[in-house]
Structure formats: C-alpha cells, structure tokens
Image (tube, grey):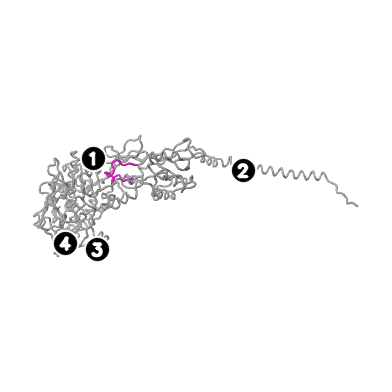
Amino acid sequence: MYGRRQHKNPQAEAEQFRRRAAVGFLGVLLGLGVLAGWYFKLQVLDHDVYATRSEANRIKARPVVPGRGLIYDRKGRLLAENVPAFRLDVTPNKVQDMAATLDGLRAIFSLSDEDIERFNQSRKARRSFIPVTLKLRVSDEEMARFAVDRWRYPGVELEPYLTRRYPYGDLLAHVIGYVGRVDDKDLQELGEGNAALTHIGKSGLERYYEDQLRGKVGYERVETNVQGRAIRTLGRVPAQSGADLRLSIDVDLQQAMVTAFGEQEGSAVAIDPRTGEILAMVSLPSYDPNLFVNGISHADFKRLNENPSRPQFNRLVLGGVAPGSTVKPFLGLAGLDSGLRRPEDKILSRGMFYLPGVSRGWGDANRGGHGWTDLRKSISQSVNTYYYQLGTDMGVERYDQYMGGRYGFGQPTGIDLAGEIGGILPSPAAKARLRNERWYPGDMVNASIGQGLWKVTPLQLVRGVGGLASGQLRRPHLVVEQKVGFDHDWAPLPQPESRPISPNPANLQAVREGMMGTMQPGGSGWRVAAGAPYLMAGKTGTAQVVSRKGTAAVNPKNLPMHLRHRALFIGFAPAEDPRIAIAVAVEGGGYGGAAAAPIARKVFDAWLLGVMPEVQQAADAGGVVEGAANAGSAVSAPAAAPPGEPLPTPVPSPASSPASSPVPVQEERR
C-alpha cells in the first residue's frame, strides 16, 4: 500500500517566498546603502584628501633656489658673483637600479670616485623624493651626449643653476671666503625648507653673512605627464634673492698691500680711523677660493694642506703674535692716564735694567743706554728701560686694566668675520692656565715691552692704533651697505659704537708726538718716511721667536727663516689729520723698521697719493735694530733700507711661540 501523498500548501510557499524576497531585497538595499555611503565618504567627506592626492600625481612642487647675494667693493667692483651653469640631479625614488644608473652615467659624464662617494653620502642624508646633485658644472659636450640617451635614465635631470665665482681669486680669499657644497651637518642646520640648496658659506664673509646672502627658497607648481615630464607651470611662490653686500675694502689698495709684501709672508690691515672701516686686509700666502666652490679635488686639497706656509690659515683673525715694542705707545698712554707719569718725566737709561735682588738684567738697544728719556723719546727711540720701569711701577693688575679693559687687547675686536680669537693678555691667571707656572716679577718686565705671554692679532693692533689716531676706539668692520632685491636702494648698516681711548686729550697728543718722532730723523723708522710729502706717525716692533742664551747676542740673519724675529709696524697718516691707520706683521722679517715699515709706507702712498708699488724681488736686508731681542750685545745694528729699496728676505712658515722663563729675554731697539 502506497504512502499517503503530502499535499503542497501554496499559501505557505507564497508566504515563504515573500519573506525570502523581502530579506534579499533588504540585503540589496543595505549593500547599496553601504556602497552609497562609501561613495559619499569618498566624494564628499574625503574629497579634499583625494583631490590633493590626485593633484600631487599630476602637479609637482619644485623648489626654486634663490640667487645668492653679490658682494662688491667700495667702488662697486664685483668680488663674488653668480654665473649660470648646469648640474646633474638624481631623484633616488624614481631610479629602480641605482648602481646600473650610475655606471651608465659614468660613460656619459666625467664622474670621479669622489663624485660618486659624495652623492651616496648625500643620498643617505636626504629623503628619497628630494633630488641629489651628482655633478656640478656639466659641460656642453656632456649635455649633448646625455640628450641622446636621456630616456634611458628616469629620475635623472639636468638642472640650471647659478654657481659662485670669485673674479679676484686669491687676492681676497681670507676676506670673502668661499661657498662649498652642502654636507650632512649643513643639512641639519639648514632644515627641511632649505634642502634644495646645494651650497653654503664655509668661511669669511660668505659664512658670517650666510643668512643674508642665502635668501629664501621658493616653489613652483608644475603640471607633469605620466612619465613625470613637465608640461607647464601652474603657479609660483617666488624665491627671495639674497642680500647684496657692499664692503669698505678697496681692491686697488688690497692689490697694493699684496704687492708691497713682495715674497714675504705675514698679514696686514688698514682702516679708516674715523669710521673703523677696513680699507684693505691681507693674509699671506693666500689660495684660490674657486677651488672649493664645486668640491675641491684630493690633489688640490693635499697640496694646500701640506704647504708648510699654511695658505688657508687666516692670520688676520686666527694668528697671534707677540706685539713687541708696538705696545709701547699704549703703555705710555696708560702711564699718563693712570697718573704714574707725566709727559715730561724722565728716567735715566744706562743700557741695562735690573730688578731688586736679580743679577740678570734687561737691556736697551744701545749698549751705553739712551740717557735721560721722557715719554716722547721713549716712543721715538724705543727705549726699553722707560717701559721696564713703568711696567714694574704699574703692576700687572693695573697693566691689564688698561691694556685689556681700556684698549681691548686680549679680546676679539668684533669684526664681521667668523672665528676671531681674542689673543692672550699677560696675567698670573693666564700663565697658570697656559703653562701651569707662577707669575714672576720678570714676567712683568717682559710684558712691558710686548714679550712673554703676549699674543695679539693684527686686527687688535689696528683697532688700537686707529684709536690713537682718532681718539676713539671703533670696531673694525667690512660691510658698510646692504641691498635686498633689485628694486631697493643700498641701505647703510648701523655704525658701530665707539668710546674714547683716553679721557685726557693732552696725554693722547703727547703719545702721538712720540709716534711722529719715530718717523723723523733719530727715530727707529725715520728712513722709511724719508721723502714723503705727508707726515707719518708710527711705531716699529720686533717679536722674538727664540730667546738668547745668557748674554750672547742672537742675530736673526743667522737663524733659519722660521726662527727669525717677527717684524711689526703700526702707524697712521697724515699724522695731523689721519685718514688711514695700519698694522703690519711680517713673519721671519727680522726687524720692524726694515721689513714691516716699508710695507706700511707703500700702502700709505697708494691710498694718499695714488702711487701703486711696483713688484720687486725680495732681498735679504737689515734694518734699524729695535727695542727687542739681544739688548746688551756688541752686534751693531744694520741700516734700514730706504723706500724703494728691495724688500727683506722672503718669509717661510709661521714659527712657534717662544718659551717663557721667570727671567725674560731682552730685545733690541725697535
């Protein structure tokens, strides 16, 4: 018997279908709602985000590097300029195989191992989307070869830029300095906003005024195709060019100063004592700053670094020498202002000076002494005994108070060049710090004639002599005007503050008269001033490098060049209305009257008369023996060469400082 057949329930099936259809319809609606909501989020809520991303794929922000500010001399001659060139940039995130790309580029461009190494270092320090310079100053031939195979190297571009050039080469290297390629340390200091910069100031004015010369980086919006090639520029935030600088330096006087040195080495600074503006300043030997702009080669750097004369060493701000007898006008003025001396007070110079209880003496240049000596004679004839006694009477505390606090020795001048040192002002604290030795009475005798612990820079000396000339101590400075943009005029920079060098004009005049006597017959520098149509005032000086042994004389002409005395001179002209003041230091020059003073005379002639010195070969010449080394010796002083005679022997590398002793060395007349 068959089972009973179950009958269908159409009504139930229809109801079940309706429920399923409703659930399916609701599911579809829910899916469409979610999809609509997602589209709403993309199109409405996140519109700005995705629109920005889309624009970023189509529009690139390309940095615009500003033109670096130009540097001019006082007459408007270009000292540092920008010249157009092309560089090879690589964007790392667009290069799939960097090693293969670099190998291919080496076949097109003259790339050295140094270029590749520098590129890899810079690439590690930057984000991958920032272009990195592989080679600067690409030649026309290299650009032509690259144009043929450019499609093979995505992410590699030739970019126009302005490179730095110094038209006067080594003439102003230690003043202008140079720019160099940005390194990792520079990137950290510059920040992300300046990552597009390729060069930064490394030394001199280029470094000191980096913020002003650099300007501000701009950006431009460039539309690109799918290959990343630029189609058109859509907008621009212009770069702000760096400020132009006008210096007080005169190129003609700068060249005259270099020529006046001949083959000698050393440094010199000339200023306008009425303003503190630097007219010329040289450190010799010098170097060509153009070598450093696009990366100096190992060979060139080794040649400079191994030169015993150290061309890169800036003697103007980093070099310290004992001032020798050039401190005597300052010490004489301190004696007057402190009330210890009057201009007419006299001491008797017998040829030797002794401290109580000390058997070893300190001598004058004249073995028999100079006789009765007042302030003016002590300066003009450089009488050591006058200053031995004055320094002893003054004491080291009052000595430092005047020489440091009043005249600015032992501290930077504040010139607008980076890295200036303050030198060394003799004191018990300085001797304990530098040599771990106690202060002896003989150290004060040494200090009174500019020997012993003394170290000054040419800038400190020229600031001081400028103060003697004008009555006001002023900060030496190089930049006098600044201009931002082509549509602006030159704006003078604020003049540095000044302060009187002496509260008593009569005391200052007595010192000036002593310096005038130096350049008159009977003075230690009179031969140099012979025939000048203007009146000069000055003070010669000689700084020892080696000490004498016992009472034996040390003739510098018998010493190796690096052990010979340093010749110095400070002065100003015209003496009655000073328009130029100068400090000269010649390394290994012997005596100030023979080596340094003739240089000053030629600089004076160039500035006041327009007479440029002729290039001459250096010759070994003697000079007026000054109040420095070997006093008390029987060696007679050779005569100084008159103006126009050959300059003294060429000077070698800087010498080491003389060792100090409880009983100081003595000096010959400066």
**Residue beneath label 3, please?**
437
Residue furthest to the front: 107
Give left or right: position of 186 versus 275: right
Residue 38 image label: 2
Residues packed near mark 3 inside 10 Å, few (<14), some (14 to 19) or many (20 plus): some
Tell me where the magenta segment starts and ends, as one range: 164-178
**Residue beneath label 1, please?**
252
The numbered mark, 4 or 3, whose residue comes first in the sequence reads 3
The numbered mark, 2 or 4, whose residue comes first in the sequence reads 2
Residues at badges 2 and 4 in contact (C-beta under 8 Å)? no
Q: What amino acid does circle 4 point to?
A: Lys
Q: Is residue 14 magenta?
A: no
The numbered mark, 1 or 4, whose residue comes first in the sequence reads 1
The numbered mark, 3 or 1, whose residue comes first in the sequence reads 1
Residue 333: % across, % down: 17, 51
Q: Is residue 650 visible to the viewer in this orientation of the structure?
A: yes
**Residue beneath label 4, please?**
549
Residue at 23% in and 40% down = 252
The numbered mark, 2 or 1, whose residue comes first in the sequence reads 2
Nearer the observer, disc 4 or disc 3? 4
Residues at badges 1 and 4 in contact (C-beta under 8 Å)? no
